Image: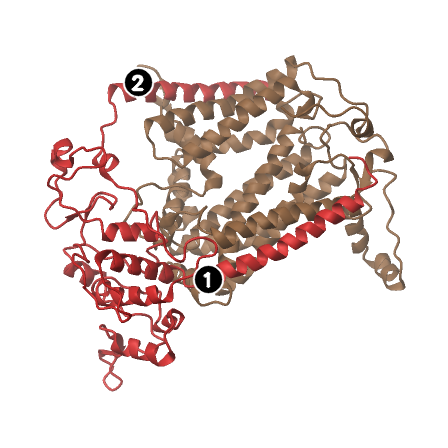
Amino acid sequence: MVRLIAFLVGLFFSGMLLLGLGDTVVSAIKEPALPTVEAGFHEETLPVTFAHDGPLGKFDRGQLQRGLKVYSEVCAACHSMKLVAFRDFAALGYSEDQVKALAKGWKTEVPSINPETGEPATRPGIPADKIPSPFANETAARAANNNALPPDLSLITKAREGGPAYVYSLLLGYRDQAGYKNEEGKELLKEFPDAATPPGLHFNPWFANLNIAMANPIASDDLVTYDDGTKATRAQMAKDVSAFLTWTAEPKMENRKSAGWAALGFLLIFTILAFMSYRTIWADKKH
Amino acid sequence: MSFPWAQEYKPQGTVSKWVDERLPLPRLVYNAVGAGYPVPRNLNYFWNFGVLAGVALVIQIVTGIVLAMHYYASVDGAFNSVEHIMRDVNAGWFLRYAHMNGASFFFIVVYIHIFRGLFYGSYKAPREMIWLLGVTIFLLMMATAFMGYVLPWGQMSFWGAQVITGFFSAIPLVGEPLRQLLLGGFAPDQAALNRFFSLHYLMPFVIAGVIILHVWALHIPGSSNPTGVSVKGEQDTVPFHPYYTAKDGFGLGIFLILFVAVTFFAPNMLGHPDNYIPANPLSTPAHIVPEWYFLPFYAILKAFTVDFGIPFTGIIIIPAKLMGVLAMFGSILLLFFLPWLDTSPVRSGHYRPLFRKFFWYGLIPSLVVLTYCGGKPPYTQWVVLSQIAAAYYFAHFLIILPIVSRIERPLALPNSITEAVTGKPLPAAA
């Protein structure tokens, strides 16, 4: 009885799936999927390597400091960084006093209250503060940005496929759409005349739907002056800020890697000993 | 319980004797995983995975209890509390990554454990009850893992909860009220998050309880073995300790090396980037996908694309969505009936030439295809592949297996485990 019911159920499910298979094939032939502009013109991330790549990689402190400079002078005008506190910058190689000065000198002040009247007010930052956001709330952010919401950047390299390479590619990915061709030499506006970037958006083939609300934030060299004398080319700024955003997404990455090697070393010895005791104990037993 | 030649627990000191007379807990452990449990001498490495699954559960419970001390189940605070753990709690990043990847490794070892049982016929008499309890554990694990994935309240957490609880709304009449009852609202929100946290903390202990029953049921007939031939005498077995404790210790070392390699060097490899974006009920991700261990079932769900009805009348008896949900649950529930679907008296796949072919060239590829397609967007080629693979999956268990059991001519079995080990070699696995 069980087997009879099972047979019928199996016949039903498999039969319906094969019917569905026929249906899928027929409709794919009748109405073939139209090519999409994203499928043809969305670009893979640019090849870029960082000091922190790989199981042995460590952050380049100088690069992180340069990245912080780019973030604070360029990105922070629109993008918040809610999960990072000023005190965390000590890990970038800043002294306690430098961290205090960074917090105090930050362009946006920290929301607070007037201690006498209780009215909303702002005060300069201290190391314990999280980095203050450029806009008071989402509505204010959208109002100032043509109804687009600049995402919080704390976790951005973990929240996007491709991580820091994606951020790097996106920052350098602004192109002139007129006459833009992909690697196969196909011209976008000839293949998809309807796909012209709408006003208020900007063409960037590294962005998921090719049209991003953010204007090119590093359109020219020397937007910042690096303290260590590094030439602030567009590629340099994009790379430095991508490295910095990797750190903000995972400030404990170096701890993770070094703990990993210690754990692997311990386990290797444990496993060798376990294997030897296994062989010794079973030496007299054929199995 | 077990075999008459099992070594008896002999308490040595006065304290041990005193304890043994009042609460023979050491005796219980001795008989369960000590020298008092005789085990076939020919177990291969696939028999390590039960112990490994137990270790994985312990890792999850220990890391989970500490994480719960820092986690805050609130729609406004959950995401940030997880990031607080990652950034500010001492070794919090380790606890969180270990718990997150621990779930994946728990499923990896349990899947291997299940396939061991499927290939070597561990579900057959007299071990049906062990199998039934095992499938129950698997279902409980899936529920626990699903609720755990919701807790960080990222985009995939929220939309995963939305999609999975949406399955219930496919049930006619009671579906939508049932879904609202489960969620405590119309969509996943504070009520749902709170109860998921509560249940996610409870269920591992329920799993631990069912594992005790699973191991208890195992100790009635004793462990199966790669030949599938029953134990005939003392020469066929060795005491669990030290023989299999040593072998499991080695297996555990390998397991932990792989677990540590992923946890410390590629902790987000098995996750989805979207779950690092805070949940936003107003913005649906481009592709909602579950964790990798649910992908085959997700592919089965999506493979049903046509309604079942009376042709040319437009009357629909079972809509495609409901059928997908039924099939998805059915694909696991059918495992409960496996001991009665596979009627071959030969347990081990080694001695079943036809069964072995369907297992390696049918079942395994179909599950690989389903896992792969489950994570893909619904383009024609992926839908077609998952429909073929899902059709095979159901046919394998419900149609092919009962027929194979009837028509197959199994190879000659060795007379005993000892003969198989010391005499002629086992036929090589296909």
Look at chain A in the picture and name its colour.
red
Quick check: A169 above or below A25?
below
For residue B135, say whether it is visible: no
Taking the view exactly as shown, the residue that stands out farthest to the bottom is A116
Image mark 2: chain: A
- Residue at the image position 44 percent from the left and 68 percent from the top: B88
- Residue at the image position 37 percent from the left and 78 percent from the top: A95
Q: Which residue is mark 2?
A: A26
Q: Position of residue B177 (x, y in %)?
A: 39, 42
Q: Is residue B28 left or right of residue A42?
A: right
- Quote the CA–CA distance across marks 2 and 1: 54 Å
Quadrant in the picture for the C terminus of chain B? top right
Q: Secondary structure at mark 1?
A: helix
Quadrant in the picture for the N terminus of chain B? top right
Tag count: 2
Quick check: A186 above or below B52?
above
Q: Residues within 10 Å of mark 2 (few under 14, many from 20)?
A: few
For residue B12, say whether it is visible: yes
Q: Nearer the viewer, mark 2 or mark 1?
A: 1
In the picture, residue A184 is in which quadrant?
A: top left
- Closer to us: B55 or A56: A56
Quick check: B397 above or below A231?
above
In the picture, residue A223 is in which quadrant?
A: bottom left
- The circle drawn on residue A104 is none
- Closer to us: A134 or B132: A134
Is there one chain holding both mark 2 and mark 1? yes
Q: Secondary structure at mark 2?
A: helix
The chain that appears brown in the image is: B
Q: Position of residue A269 (x, y in %)?
A: 66, 54
Q: Is residue B144 left or right of residue A154?
A: right
Q: Which residue is mark 1?
A: A254
Q: Position of residue B31 (x, y in %)?
A: 80, 47
